[in-house]
Image (cartoon, rainbow, N blue to C red):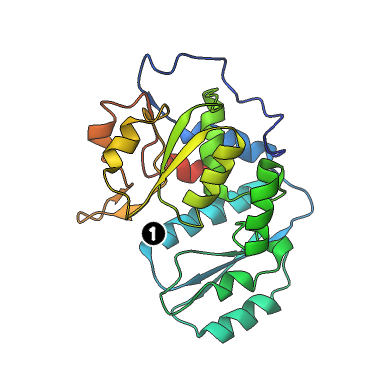
Amino acid sequence: MHPYYENSQFKKNSINYQLMLKIFNGNLLAKQLMEQMKVKGRPSLSIIMVGDSVASKSFINRKLKACEFVGIDAKLYQFDQLEQDKLIRHIQSLDTDGILVQLPLPSYLNRSIIEAIPVEKDVDCLHSANLEKLIVQGELNPLLPCTAAAVLQILDYYNINLAGQKVTVIGRSVLVGLPLSLLLMKRNATVTVCHKQTSNIQEHILNADIGAIVIDVGINRAENNKIVGDVNFDLVSKKASIITPVPGEIQLTSGN
């Protein structure tokens, strides 16, 4: 377990989570986590956003509020558009303790932006060197991808033992799916990763031991301008034993 929460007091006593639906309340867990993470000395964080994504703005607003609460001086650098070489030079010029590039970036920018972040300042753990460390060290790595870590935190909250369990992860992005799969395997889960080219995803979901626990990390804006996740909450909540609603729960716990 990661040192940020290995000694935390918010774990519940063992429960039979299959008996009833649990709509996870991320507010309580997020507040408890942030209370424990309050820092001294006012470390600094630079957040970089390119473009005008509504979802990204929503994530960033939560991050700024979380930083203020725990005592981190966060500064947002927002650009409507910026050439890649200029953005790299901007990143390299930052005098800060941590750097976070809000994803997704516009299509004309590539992964060189992430690789320009100094490894020790890569708070999202997206630099290739940090991903390599994650493969070897798992949760012992000093930096963890925030959303993947939040998923594990929720599973810990309900005392769900992953050892020997079949888990299905939908999505293989470097931001969430890939690191989450690695961390789940480090906890001895048997992990199936589904993606756009996977046939019969439903079969993989039904085959999962942890399939009745739905942790929705997605965030989208529906036609009615409402923020929603990737899962049909009204439909899936009738079948799931634990589910995280969107917006709010996984985003609160991860700081997104």
Q: Is residue 254 visible?
A: no
The image quadrant that residue 30 belongs to is top right
Q: Which residue is mark 1?
A: 55
Near-viewer residue (2 or 75): 2
Q: Position of residue 232 (x, y in %)?
A: 26, 40
Name of the residue lying farthest toward the left: 223
Residue sitting farthest toward the right: 41
Q: Secondary structure at mark 1?
A: helix
Question: Is residue 250 shown above or below 53?
Answer: above
Q: Taking 49 as reference, is 238 left or right? A: left
Q: Is residue 4 visible?
A: yes
Q: Amino acid at mark 1?
A: Ala
Residue under the point 56% across and 38% down = 185
Name which residue lies at 32% across and 55% down: 197
**In the picture, residue 2 is in which quadrant?**
top right
Image position, residue 75 (x, y; %) = 61, 66
Residue located 52% across and 30% down the image: 155
Q: Position of residue 168 (x, y in %)?
A: 41, 38
Quarter of the picture containing the N terminus is top right
Choose top left, top right, bottom left or bottom right for residue 114.
bottom right
Q: Which percent across, then down, holds residue 50? A: 47, 73
158 sits left or right of 216 in the view: right
At label 1, counting other C-alpha atoms closer than 10 Å, the crowd grade (few under 14, some 14-19, many 20 or more) is some
Q: Is residue 23 left or right of residue 117?
A: left
